[in-house]
Amino acid sequence: MSIFRSLFFTAALVGLIVGSVVTLVQYVGTTPLILAAEVYEVSEPVVETHSHDAAAATDGHSHDHGEAWAPADGWQRNGATLVANILTAIGFALVLNGLMQVVGQGTGKGADWRSGLVWGLCGFVTVMLAPSFGLHPELPGTPAAELLDRQVWWIGTALATAAGLGLLFLVRKPWAAALAILLIALPHLIGAPLPPHGETALAPAELSHRFITVATLTSLVFWALLGTLSGYFSRRFAA
């Protein structure tokens, strides 16, 4: 029971720290870019539609009362971002710490901040870097394929990359390396779902490129900090 208690306590502590830090990084990095892109999205003219369930629009303002609630700009949006980041960090910390515990018991090597950093970088490659070769971070108003198609490809890419990295680091045999390369490359050989032909992004290309760079670096900070702190606190609590 103490192992599970330590696992959950470590994940909660790491999630709280990482979620708070990444929220600050986003506040000065990605958030201003998203707000700038939303200006282009809002300024788009309202297209008249004859669908029976479409909301009537007057002066560019929708009157659809069934629209989902969204936090207002300011403290509501920042607060919602903070809560979402903390919960996301806790969830990933649980997975990361659980894998570190299982692999550590199998190899007889305890976790520390160095091994935690390696795990975190593997998480970054799995969750962010590999999928971004096909589906890069997108600003509001960016054309995209159907959501379900993107989700299926993203999940498949993450699973294939995780399996490939596991074979490379844990098995370390020629056949495992060959299979790992095949697994990592397979989703990209299949190809990510493409957005509808002819649609263009609303925000300028340079804004989109900057967002991709900043979002990728933010994710790197997230995973590096998540892994390092997970390894550090796991070793500290175990002692």
Image (cartoon, rainbow, N blue to C red):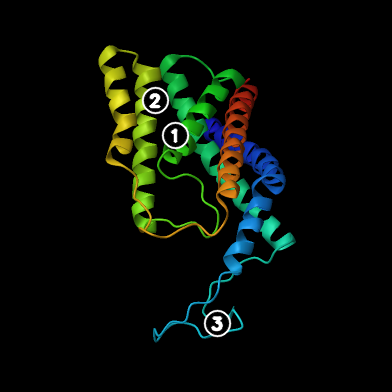
What mark, if any, has residue 218 been given in the picture?
none
Element under disc 1: helix
Badge 2 amino acid: Leu
Residue at 42% from the left image edge and 60% from the top image edge: 199
User: Going from the N terminus, do you reach mark 3 or mark 1 first?
Assistant: 3
Q: Quadrant of residue 5?
A: top right
What mark, if any, has residue 165 been given in the picture?
2
163 or 217: nearer the viewer: 217
Question: What is the x, y in percent for residue 194?
Answer: 35, 51
Quarter of the image that includes the C terminus: top right
Question: What is the x, y in percent for residue 87?
Answer: 58, 48
How dense is the environment of label 1, judged by Cα within 10 Å: few (below 14), some, or many (20 and up)? many
Q: Is residue 82 visible?
A: no
How dense is the environment of label 3, judged by Cα within 10 Å: few (below 14), some, or many (20 and up)? few
231 or 161: nearer the viewer: 161
Question: What is the x, y in percent for residue 38?
Answer: 61, 61
Badge 3 amino acid: His
Element under disc 3: loop
Q: Are marks 1 and 2 in contact (CB under 8 Å)?
A: yes
Q: Are marks 2 and 3 in contact (CB under 8 Å)?
A: no
User: Going from the N terminus, do you reach mark 2 or mark 3 first?
Assistant: 3
98 or 172: nearer the viewer: 172
**Residue lying furthest right in this view?**
75
Q: Are marks 3 and 1 in contact (CB under 8 Å)?
A: no
Residue at 59% from the left image edge and 25% from the top image edge: 231
231 or 153: nearer the viewer: 153
Identify residue for label 1: 126
Question: What is the x, y in percent for residue 94?
Answer: 52, 38
Q: Is residue 24 visible?
A: yes
Badge 1 amino acid: Thr
Q: Is 216 placed above or below 41 here?
A: above
Identify residue for label 3: 65
